[in-house]
Image (spheres, grey):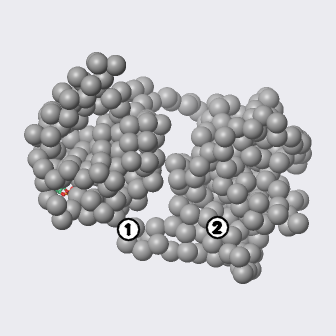
Amino acid sequence: MNKGIFVFIEQREGTIQKVAFELLGKANELAETTNSQVTAILLGHEIASQGEHLIHAGADEVLYVDSQDYQHYVTEYYTQALTAVIKEHEPEIFLFGATAIGRDLAPRVSARIHTGLTADCTKLEIDEETGLLFMTRPAFGGNIMATIICPEFRPQMATVRPGVMQVLTLDESRQGNIKKFYFQLIKEKNKIEIIDIVHESKHKINIEDAKILISGGRGVGSKENFNKLYDLADVLDAEVSSSRAVVDAGWQDRQRQVGQTGKTVRPNLYFACGISGAIQHVAGMEDSDLIIAINKNSESPIFEVADVGIVGDLNVILPKLTEALKVKLNEK
Ligand SMILES: Cc1cc2nc3c(=O)[nH]c(=O)nc-3n(C[C@H](O)[C@H](O)[C@H](O)COP(=O)(O)OP(=O)(O)OC[C@H]3O[C@@H](n4cnc5c(N)ncnc54)[C@H](O)[C@@H]3O)c2cc1C
C-alpha cells in the first residue's frame, strides 16, 4: 500500500465547500485503483463535527488542525500546516480545488516541498503501467488538452476545477479515524492580516446547482431578448446561463457564464440557444445529461454535442416552446 491520497478540505466560515466533496469522490476512485487510502485535511476552528461527514463522503481518515488561527484562510498559516502534514505523512498525491483559495495555497505548498503542481485539472487518472497520476488540463485557450506527469517528486499535486468531478452518494455506514494534527506554527512569518471580511451583497446566482439551464449566446441578439429565455426558465423552474460572447457584450452577468473561463455545469437539461458551440464553451457543459440546441445554422458545431437539435430562429421557437410547455405542465 502506498502512502495515500490527501485532499485539502476547503471551508469558509466553517462550511465545507462543495469542491471538497467532489475531490473526495475522485480521490476515492483513484484510491481504489492504487489500493491506497484517502485522507482529508481539514483546517479550522471548532469544526471537528464535520469530520464524520467527510468520512461518509469518501475519506478513510481525517487529519484536523484545530486552532483559532485556522478559522479563516491565511496563506502563510495554511501553507505551514500543509507543509508539515506532507513532511510527516509523505502522501503520494495531494489534491486541491482550483478555487481562489486553492489556487493561492497549492503553489506555495508545492514550492516549499519542492514538488510538481498541475493547475486547474479537468481529468485525473492513474496510468496502469507506471502508477503515475495523469493530470489533464486544457491549455492554450482550450485548444489542446495537456496531460502532465510528475515522475520524480512527491506528492504529485494538482488543483482541480470545481464542478468537474462527481460527488459520491453519502454512505453513513462508512467508518474512519478523525485525528488531530499538531505542529508548531511560526506566526512571525505571516505577512498578512485580515482586517475585515466583506460579503458580496448582491444576489448570488448559482448556475452550477441548477437542474435545468436555459443558456443563451450571441444569437439571442440583445439583452432585452434574453426575456424569452427567462420566460422559458420560469415555466421550467430553471436558471439562465450564457456564453462568454454574451457576457463580453454586457448582456449578462459574469456569474452566468458557462465554459472554460466561466463555470463548468452538469445539469439534467441544457438548452443552448443561439450558441455556436465553440470548444471553450462546450468544455463547460458537455457533460450535461441532455443537451437541446436551437440554432439557425445547421452547420453549427453545437449540433455535434447536442442530443436534440432544432434548426431555426430562436425568436420563433422559444415563445412557442414556452407556451406549449405551460399548457402541458398545467394539464398535470
Ligand atoms: C481563452 C479563451 C477562453 C474562452 N472562454 C469561454 C468560455 O468560458 N465560455 C464561452 O462561451 N466562450 C469562451 N470563449 C469564447 C469562445 O471561443 C466563443 O467565442 C464563444 O463561445 C462564442 O459565443 P456564442 O456561441 O454565444 O457566439 P457565436 O459564436 O457568435 O455564435 C452565435 C450563434 O447563434 C446562432 N444564431 C444567430 N442568430 C440566431 C437566431 N435568431 N436563432 C438561432 N440561432 C441564432 C448562430 O448561427 C451562431 O451559431 C473563450 C475564448 C478564448 C480564446
Q: Is residue 101 above or below residue 5?
A: above
Report crowding for label 2: few under 14, some 14 to 19, many 20 or more residues within 10 A (C-alpha): some
Q: Position of residue 312 (x, y in %)?
A: 12, 50
Q: Is residue 55 above or below residue 161?
A: above
**Residue beneath the point at 42% across and 31% down:** 204
**Residue beneath the point at 75% across and 65% down:** 33
Report crowding for label 1: few under 14, some 14 to 19, many 20 or more residues within 10 A (C-alpha): few
Which quadrant contains ligand 1?
bottom left
Q: Position of residue 87 (x, y in %)?
A: 85, 62
Q: Give the residue at mark 1.
A: 141
From this viewpoint, is residue 52 visible? yes
Asked which secondary structure carries label 1, the reply is: loop
Q: Is residue 314 above or below residue 261?
A: above
- Label 1 beta carbon within 8 A of ligand 1: yes
Q: Position of residue 114 (x, y in %)?
A: 73, 71
Foreground residue, 230 or 245? 230
Q: Amino acid at mark 1?
A: Gly
Q: Amino acid at mark 2?
A: Glu
